[in-house]
Amino acid sequence: MTSKLKTKNKRAGRMAKKSGQVALQEEINNNEDWEKLLEKTGLYVVEIYTEWCGPCIPMIANLKKIKLELGGDNLHYGIAKSDTIDHLARFRNKSEPHWMILYDGCLVNLIIDTNAPKLMKLIAIEFENYNKFKKGEIQPTFIPFNQITEEENRKMVDKNQYYEQIFKEEKRIRAERMVKIREHAIKKFVPNIQKQTCVIFFPHTIKYVMVEKSPEDGMETLDEPIMHEQRICDLATVCARKFEELIVIDAKEVQLTEDTLNEIFFLDLQILQSYPQELIDQILSNKVYSIMISSPTVVYENEEDETDIEPPDIMGVIESRMSLIIYGEGGALNPSPNSIAAQNKALTEEGVILPSLYTPINPMSKTAALTVLFRKYCETNGYIPPQSPAPQFLVIFDITKSNIVLPIVEDLEDKILNYGFFRSADPENPKLLCKDPELLASYGMDRVGKDAKLVISVLKDDKDKYLLRFVDVGPVYVSSDENIGIDDAIKFFPHDFEEMDGEIKLWLARETREENAQAENFSDYEEEIDNEYNEEIKAEENSMMI
C-alpha cells in the first residue's frame, strides 16, 4: 500500500469517527439552537460545557453503548455550549460536567458527576420513567431552567465545605511555620528590651465615667461645662503604688483579636488555657488596658578613670520583680493569697472566678507581649516583625553545575531568597558547607566530595519564568509546587540561616588559629635559641676575662 493511500484511509477513518460522533450528539451552540431543542420530543441527555473546558469526550463511548442497549428511538444526546446560550449562563464558570435530563423539552433532572457507571444507570432509570410518562403512568415535576436545583445546592455545599477544610489546613500549616519564625524574631529582639515589661488589665477592671473637661489656656469659660469620657482602672492605680522606682513609660487601650491574643501568650500558652471562656469572650469583645514599665537608666562608671563600664546583666530582672509584685511568691497559675492577683480576682454571677491582670513571667514571654501591645515602640528599638514565607520553589543541582547556575543566580539576585552549598541533599540532615563560592574555591572542590549540592530557593512568579531558567540547566530536584517549596526551603534554610557559618568557614577559622599557634610557638622557640646563644656568648666572654 502506498503512503498516499495510507494517508487517504487514515483521513477517511477520522471523518467516519467524527460523523459518528455528530450523529450521536447534537450540538447546541447558541440561543436559536437551544430554542429548537426545547421544541423537540423525546428524552434528551444534554451535557452543558464551557469553551475553556470542553465537553466530556471519554463519555461518548458510554453514551453510544447505552443507546444501543436500550434501543430506544426516544433517547437522544446533545452538547450545549453555555458560553453562548442565555439560559445556561450560570454554568459558564463550571469545570465539572453538568448533565440535563429533558422530557420533551422540559427539565426534570440535573446530574453533576464524572462517574460514568453511575451516569449510565441514571440514564437508564430516566429512560424507563420517560416511557411511563408518555403512557400517562407518572407525572414528573418539571424544573424551571433559571431555578437552582437540589443537586446544584448540594454540590455547592460540598464544594464550600471542601474549600473550608482546605483553608483550615492551610491556616494550620501557616501557623506552624510562623511559630519558629516568630520565636526567632523574638529571641533576636530580647536583648534590646531588657529593662521593659508590661502589665495587662482585663476589661472587667476598667470603667468609664463622664468628667468635666478643663478649659484650655486662653479659652473663655463657657456657661455649660464640656463633658468627656474618662477611663478609670483602680487596679492599675493599686499596682502603680507597688512599682517603687519602676517607671510607667506608656499606657494604652488595645482591642485584641483571637490571633493577637494568641501572639501575646505565645510562650505562656498554659496561662491562657487556664482562663475561663467568659474571660476570653470579654477580652475579645472589649479593650484591655496595658501599661509598659521600665527600670530607670543607670550609668555605671569606672571609679579609677571615670569612664563608662559594662553594666551588669539585667536579663530577666524586671520580669521577676513584676511577677513578685503581681503574683507574690507563687505564679500566674497559683498566686500567693496576699498577692495583687489573688486579692483582685472577679466573680461572675455564675460563680466563675476571673483573673483581673497578667504580667509576663520571663524575657521571651515579655517580649512576645510587648511586640503586640506596644508594636511601634518595639519597631523603633529594632524589632523586625516576622513575615510569612513567600511562595517559592527549592531547586537542587549537582555542585559540578555551579559554573552554569551561579551566573543565573547573580542575574536573578532579587528573585533568589537563599542559596548555599551543602555536603549532600538530605533534607532531614542538611550540612551547610558555605554560602560563598569563593570560600568553596579556597577549600577546594576535591575536598567537597561528589555528593555535594548547590541548593537554591527561588521566588514563584506568574508564569514561573524564574524557575524555568533553572529547570533548563537540569536540576536533580525541584519542588512540586510553591507550598511544598516553602517546607523544602525551611529544611535547608532555617530561620537562623543568616547566622550560620558552614563547615568551610569553621574549617578555615580553625586552620588560621593553628597557623597562628604554630607561628607563636616558632617565635617562642627562636627567642629561646637566642637566649641560649646570648648566655653562651656571655659565658665565653666571662671566661676570657678570667
Image (cartoon, helix red, strand yellow):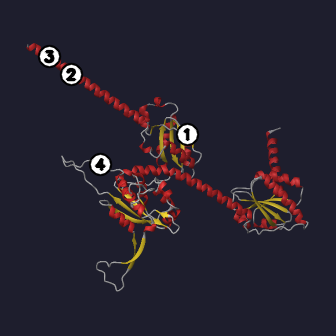
Work out whether residue 236 or residue 163 is closer to the camera in this orientation and state it. 236
* Mark 4 vs mark 3, CA separation in Å: 56 Å
Q: Is residue 490 above or below residue 156?
A: above
Quarter of the picture holding the C terminus: top left
Crowding near the residue tagged with mark 2, few <14, some 14–19, many ≥20 C-alpha atoms within 10 Å: few
Residue drawn at x 28%, y 25% as measured from the top left: 522
- Kindly identify which residue carries mark 4: 312
Task: Decide which of tag 3 and tag 2 comes sooner along the chain.
Answer: 2
Lateral position of residue 83 relative to residue 207, left or right = right
Among numbered discs 2 and 1, the one appearing first in the sequence: 1
Q: Amino acid at mark 1?
A: Val
Mark 2 vs 4: CB contact within 8 A: no
Q: Which secondary structure, mark 1?
A: loop
Q: Which residue is mark 2?
A: 530
The earlier-in-sequence mark between 2 and 4 is 4
> Which structural element holds mark 3?
helix
Which residue is under mark 3? 539
Q: Nearer the viewer, mark 4 or mark 1?
A: 4
Place of residue 512 in the rendered image (x, y in percent of width and height, measured from the top left): 35, 32
Determine the residue positioned at 29% across, 48% down.
312
Which quadrant of the structure image shows residue 110?
bottom right
Q: Which mark is on residue 473?
A: 1
Give the label, 2 or 4, closer to the camera. Answer: 4
Asked if the residue at tag 3 contacts the one at tag 4, i.e. Cβ–Cβ closer than 8 Å, the answer is no
Residue 318 position, x and y percent, is 35, 54
View extreme (right): residue: 135
**Which residue reaches farthest front?**
337
Mark nearer the viewer, 3 or 2: 3
